[in-house]
Image (cartoon, grey):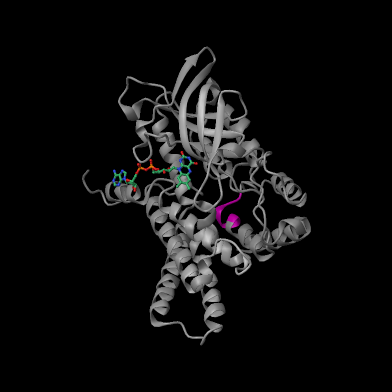
Amino acid sequence: MAQLEEFKLETRAWLEENCPAGARGSGQVHTGSSKIPLSHPDLQLWLDRMAEKGWVTPTWDKAYGGAGLSTIEYVALLEEMKAIGARPPVINRGTTMAGPTILEFGNEEQKRRLLPMIARGEGAWCQGYSEPGAGSDLASLRTSAVADGDRYLINGQKIWTSDGHTSEWMFILVRTGPLEPKHDGISFFILNMDQPGVDARPIDLINGGSHFCETFFENAVADKGDMIGELNKGWTVGKRLLQHERSGMESLVSGGAGKRATGIIDVARQYFGQRDGRLDELFRDEVTDYEMNAHALKLTQKRIVDESTDGQTPAAATSIMKVVSTELQQVHTELLAALRGTQGYGWEGEGFTSDELNSTKQWLYSRAASIYSGSNEIQRNIIAKRVLGLPD
Ligand SMILES: Cc1cc2nc3c(=O)[nH]c(=O)nc-3n(C[C@H](O)[C@H](O)[C@H](O)COP(=O)(O)OP(=O)(O)OC[C@H]3O[C@@H](n4cnc5c(N)ncnc54)[C@H](O)[C@@H]3O)c2cc1C
C-alpha cells in the first residue's frame, strides 16, 4: 500500500512537470497518424515524453516499450492523468487491439519489432475485417492472400474500414485456404497501407463526417514474417482481437459510460432551469434509469479490472459489456437531444450553440454503436452460446 502511495506521488509530480499545457483539457488526441495534422506541437511532445517513460502502453513489458506496471498502478496513473486533465498521449487501434493481439499470438521477433513501434505511437492502425459479403458472417470473407516467395499477394476488397485513409497499418483477415472449411482457411496479417496495391476510398456518413472507407487490394504485398499466428489459424487470432476491441480496457479502467451521467444532469438543469426548473415525470424516470444503469455498469467495470490480476482482457463476457455499454451510450445521446427539445436536433445555423450541434452529431453517430465491433444481435448469440452455454 505504501508502495502504491509512493508511486502515486511520483506519478503526480512527473505528470505535473511533463504534461504540456497543449495536451491538457479537451481537444485533439494524437492517433499516431502522420497523415492527420496536429493542432498543437505539444501533442507530439506529450506523446514522446509518455513513450519514453513506457506509459503509452504502461502494462506491457519494458522489453516491448511498456513500463511493466501492474493493473493497480495503471489505474492509479489514469486517475492522476484525469486529475490534471491530461489527455491520453495517443488513442489508436495499435495500442488497444493490434498490440495486445501481437503480445498474445506473435513470435518473439514480431514482438520485438512491432510492439516498440506501437508503444511509441508511430503510425495509426485500421481494421480490415468486413467485406461487402462478409459482415456478421465474417468467416465468409473472400479477400485472398497467395504465397509468392517470401511474401503474400493480397487481392480483394474490405469495407467500413474506419480511418483507412489516415492509417499507416492495417491488421487484416484474409483467405489463405480456399479449399478448407471456411473458419479453417483464414490467416491474420499486418499490412503496410502505404503501398501502390492498397487504395482506401472514404465513404460519407449520415452525421456529415467521413471516417471510414472501402479499401481495395490489387496485388498488395505482405511479408511472410507479418503473419501473426499460424497459417490458416487466423480465425482464432482475429476473434481474440475482437474481444480486446469490445472490452476497451482503457474505458473499463476509467469508468466508461458511467462517467457521462453527470453530463445529462447538467444538461437537464441547464435546459429545464430556463423553463420552470422541473423535469416532467417521464424525463425524471428516464434520467434516473440512465443514472442507475450507468452507475451499475461503472461498478461492474471496476470489478472486472479489480479481478483481472494479470491485465488480461476477459473473454466471451466482453460481449456483455459491449451490449450494455453501447445501448447505454444510445440512451445517453437520445436523452441529451430530447432534454434540449428543438435545440437538440439542429444541424447548422446561428440559432444553435456548438454543444447543441455536436449533440445532434453524437446522437446520429451513436446509432452505429450497436453495429460496429460485431452487431449487438451477434453479441447476444455469443452470450447465449459461450457465456450461458445454450445449444446452437
Ligand atoms: C461506425 C462503424 C465502423 C466500423 N468500422 C469497421 C472497421 O474499421 N473495420 C471493419 O472491418 N468493419 C468495420 N465496421 C463494420 C461492422 O463490423 C459491420 O457493420 C458489422 O459486423 C455488421 O455487418 P454488416 O454491416 O455486414 O451487417 P449484416 O451482417 O448484413 O447484418 C445485418 C443485420 O442482420 C443482423 N444479423 C446478421 N446475422 C445475424 C444472426 N446470425 N443472428 C441475428 N441477427 C443477425 C445484424 O445484427 C444486423 O442487424 C464498422 C461498422 C460501423 C457501423
Residue 20: image x %, image y %? 77, 56
Q: In which quarter of the image is residue 93?
A: top right
Q: Give the range drawn in magenta.
A: 69-74
> Which residue is depicted at the point 49% across and 60% down?
363
The stretch drawn in magenta includes residue 133: no
The stretch drawn in magenta includes residue 72: yes
Does residue 198 sit above or below 118 in this rendering? above
Q: How many marks?
A: 0
Residue 75: image x %, image y %? 58, 58
Does residue 207 sit above or below 112 in this rendering? below
Q: Which of 117 and 148 is in front in this view?
A: 148
Q: Nearer the viewer, residue 105 or 190?
A: 190
As drawn, is 38 to the left or to the right of 170? right
- Looking at the image, in which quadrant does ligand 1 appear? top left
Residue 149: image x %, image y %? 52, 12
Q: Quadrant of residue 177?
A: top left
Which quadrant of the rendered structure holds the C terminus?
top left
Does residue 109 sit above or below 374 in this rendering? above
Residue occupying the far top of the picture? 149
Residue 278: image x %, image y %? 48, 85
Residue occupying the far left of the picture? 391
> Which residue is depicted at the point 32% across and 28% down?
182
Q: Is residue 320 visible?
A: yes
